[in-house]
Amino acid sequence: MRPFDSNRTAWNRLAAGGSQFARVATDDECRRPLELLDGRGWLPPSVAGLDVLCLAAGGGWQSVLYASAGARVTVVDLSPAMLALDRREAGRRRLSIRTLEASMDDLSELPEASFDIVHQPVSTCYVPEIGCVYREVARVVRDGGVYISQHKQPTSLQITHRDERDRYVVGLEYYREGPLPAVDDRSYRETGTVEYLHRWEQLVGEMCRAGFAIEDLREPRRADASAPPGHYGHRGRFVPPYVRLKARRIARNDEQQTTGATIWTP
């Protein structure tokens, strides 16, 4: 089975099983959508009338919040079960949300420069080439548009197990290729999915090379001093699991193609 098919099957199962990643927006959350979506102040004060792409973000939470805030929302996901939650919640709340079943690295059904904001939760770990995702996002976002994304940090994906002293072991090579093998420690791995490790030069460098200027970088805190060994909060004390990036699309007419390289002019 191809990684795409395996991941689609896994996320269909997670949606049906009531995964925390398939938790739909509540009525209270819909009354304060930007507060939930933007605790860092990365979004404009209002998104009303803006075109927003919720990328690999099915599940009835992110899309519903953006639509509740007045945005024109398209949500792309590989899982029809996750997208069904978006349609169900949009219908229940009389919101207009477009859904598209597609892979994040192939947005060919979406026109160029059609979104003001692209918001992507943790998901790039499910594709082998992160540069393909970034180039597709760069194509569909407008000049000056914002790209907010969260990713699994490479060291977190290198953890394989805990030793006899409850230390977390970095057991996978950094410069590995191909899908990650199954490991004992699954604190930040989703059951049944096929995942890939992306190095920092890929996570950050490929984004810049695709045509984005990174404006901010945060590491969401997942440390819990009271958590026992083996709990994700305990592991978060020693290895940060995620990185969150805010980037802005550089104007297309500022891109100068040279022999094998791209130069961004001020």
Image (tube, rainbow, N blue to C red):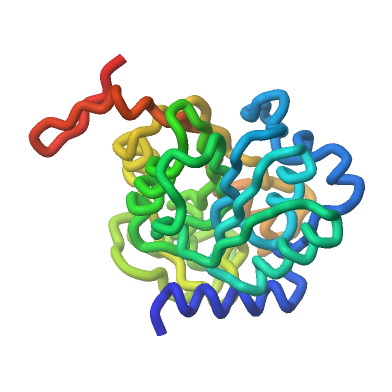
Q: Residue at x 33, y 39 (%)?
A: 210
Q: Position of residue 52 (x, y in %)?
A: 60, 42
Q: Residue 128, position in %: x, y?
A: 36, 62
Q: Please identify the residue farthest to the left as the structure is shown.
A: 259
Residue toward you, 40 or 107: 107
Please provide percent x and percent y for residue 109: 44, 58
Residue ID at (51%, 52%): 152
Image quarter in which the C terminus is found: top left
Looking at the rendering, which quadrant does residue 99 occupy? Answer: bottom right
Q: Is residue 240 visible?
A: no
User: Which quadrant does the N terminus fall into?
Assistant: bottom left
Count of marks overlaid on the render: 0
Identified at 70% across, 72% down, the residue is 15
260 relative to 73 in the view: left or right: left
Left/right of residue 141 with respect to residue 61 in the rendered view: left
Query: Is residue 260 positioned above or below 153 on the image?
Result: above
Please provide percent x and percent y for residue 67. Answer: 73, 45
